[in-house]
Amino acid sequence: MTGSIQRWLRFHHRDTVGFGTLEGQKIRVYSGDMFDDPEPTHMTMMLNDVKVLMPSVPGKVLSLWNNFRALGRSLGLEPPVEPLYLLKTPNSYLNPNETIRTPPCGDGQVAFEGVLGIVIGRSCRDIAEADALDYVFGYTCANDVTVIDTPASDESFRQLVRAKGFDTFCPFGPVITTGLEPAMLVVRTMLNGEVRQDYPVNDMIFPVAQLVSKISRDVTLNPGDVILCGTSVGFGPMKPGSMVEVEIDGIGKLCNRFA
């Protein structure tokens, strides 16, 4: 998607869920469908008066592995031939400012992974790379939370979906920003105020248009679906009580406490 830069968000106010564009500290409320010709209303709300929700309700979130050259080199991995991805389950989705919970079934180390999220705006299946950006609505911040020890806990099967699919393990938001050039973005992750990740999106092995095109050959992508682009060096464990912030200029800052 190309065009003017806008920051879209969903919110809860009293008994109503709404959506609109963020203009400073004010929300311009829209009606209809965020992904299908939404209409601006005459209503505005102050950001401090609402609860900010995850900016879309995805049918699916796909999470990339080994999609950054710097991380691959640090781990001794060869660049993949095709995108390597798994699904984050809907129970893992979490609103901004809500709490990431330690899984009750294990005591392995829980890691943060700051990532860029691609939000799909139009249904697509088997699309060409040259057309792929026409199906992207915008971009968001996400934390692809993972239990580090879980994948290797059974020698017969790497439990990656379980490791990344616990309740509250996929915070994303606070907004979806349209009109950005993703190759110019930088992802920064702070743990308790200390920068742990600071990496350029243009280090991706499969950039945005390639990801959307190649994944659309496998599965139909629908409006609101999110592709997590993978993370880079600096991800690591967090202790209960920690605050994790994922910040991308032009999008904003996703804040979640871990408990």
Image (cartoon, grey):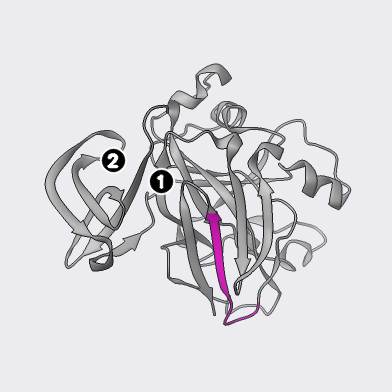
Q: Is residue 91 left or right of residue 246?
A: left
Q: Amino acid type of disc 2?
A: Met
For image coordinates 48% across by 60% down, the residue present is 254
Residue indicated by mark 1: 176
Density class for disc 2 (Cα within 10 Å; few <14, some 14-19, many ≥20) is many
Q: Amino acid type of disc 1?
A: Ile
Residue indicated by mark 2: 34
Quadrant for the C terminus in the image: bottom right
Residue 33 in the image: state x and y as whole percent: 24, 39
Q: Is residue 239 above or below residue 122?
A: below
Residue 129 in the image: state x and y as whole percent: 57, 20
For image coordinates 71% across by 75% down, the residue present is 108
Secondary structure under badge 2?
loop
Tell me, yes or no, whether the highlighted magenta stretch contains residue 152. Answer: no
Secondary structure under badge 1?
strand
Task: Pick whichever, 45 or 52, lies toward us.
Answer: 45
For image coordinates 38% across by 30% down, the residue present is 122
Mark toward the start of the polypeptide (1 vs 2) = 2
